[in-house]
Image: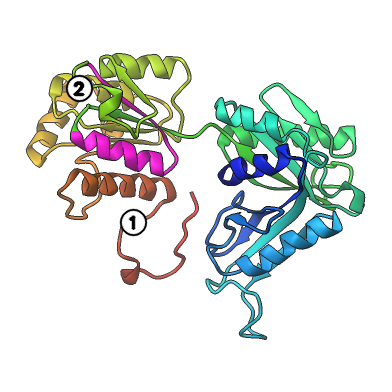
Amino acid sequence: MRDVLDELLSVWRTGGTAGVATVVRTIRSAPRQPGATMFVAPDGSVTGSVSGGCVEAAVYELANEVVASGQPELQRYGVTDEDAFAVGLTCGGIIDIFAEPMSRETFPQLEAIADDIAAHRPTAVATVIAHPDPERIGRRLVIGADTVDGSLGSARADAAVTDDARGLLAAGRSTVLSYGPDGQRQDTGMEVFVASHAPRPRMLIFGAIDFASALARQGAFLGYRVTVCDARPVFATPARFPGAEEVVVDWPDRYLAEQAAAGAIDSRTAICVLTHDAKFDVPVLQVALRLPQVGYVGVMGSRRTHDDRMARLREAGLTDAELGRLASPIGLDLGARTPEETAVSIAAEIIARRWGGRGAPLTDTDGRIHHDA
């Protein structure tokens, strides 16, 4: 929902009703992940996508139908052999779409959720997408770290889903949960889609150089909250890094240690050290590689710089296991030369490590294209 939130709020605030279709489940290969959303405004305009083109027209019609009927609907789309022109995913996968009419009346908490997302406060939205009682379909809970708003129809269901949704929110996962009709665990009948709106992952770039400016733009494009940090105030200025959300003047190792102590580093965080200076990069890498949770740590440098840096880190007491977490030299082998090409190389390696990709051309591989985390 995050990708269509601005447009949705515009309709919501004027009292209109929009059709909102959300990917709630994928089976095998699918172009979009759970949480991907298509928004159809009252004037028929469209924002967002649920399939990258395969079933967009059918989902557009479904979104209009639920607005007209006022009734949410769960629909499955997948490959079909019976009719070459039937609605299907050419990739061979299956997606479940939940479409619902959305307005002030059906979703009174929407503006509060938007405020939480803007303030980087974690919030989850749990919506009933299947139930034996049609009146329960579309009911929702909005769950924060210590708040709950709404109801799924019973106290038992609310308690079970709240507990599970907080676990998903902590992990940043969106998925369908199954319960009995009244929230009984290890039972079936009620399906609830939990959309986790965790704060955007962070990318910390150390070293205020031209490559950092290109990487900051690339990181922001991928959805990261980008911070550039350098101890030299003449270089670390917001004007030089328009792609960064924050530019910090501080010693990299001190800033990273403070962020870790404040709980601002997690398993989704990408740390990129681009300083080319041992007095900066060795101390910050000592901190980064000893953090219990961090998604990616990479450092720029030549092969000779890499060998010298590894020797310095071993002298500082880092273990082989800790050093094994380091991407050095940083990035995939794309033959990159310019700062922009290098930024793509680094971003590609971060994506590959996150999802288990190998970085090989798809023409040289077989099997599934999309990896699980």
Residue, x 71% and y 30% (percent of image)? 143
- Amino acid type, residue under disc 1 in the picture: Arg
**Magenta stretch holds residue 40:** no
Whichever of callouts 2 and 1 sits on the residue coming sooner in the sequence is: 2
Q: Which residue is mark 1?
A: 358
Which contiguous range is marked in magenta? Answer: 210-231
- In the image, is residue 311 above or below residue 31? above
- Amino acid type, residue under disc 2 in the picture: Phe
**Callout 1: few (<14), some (14-19), or many (20+) C-alpha neighbours within 10 Å?**
few
**Magenta stretch holds residue 213:** yes
Residue 130 is situated, as x and y percent measured from the top left of the image, at 81, 54
**Callout 2: few (<14), some (14-19), or many (20+) C-alpha neighbours within 10 Å?**
some
Residue 96 is situated, as x and y percent measured from the top left of the image, at 68, 60
Where the N terminus falls, by quadrant? top right
Mark 2 or 1, which is nearer the eye?
2
Per the model, the C-alpha gap separating discs 2 and 1 is 35 Å
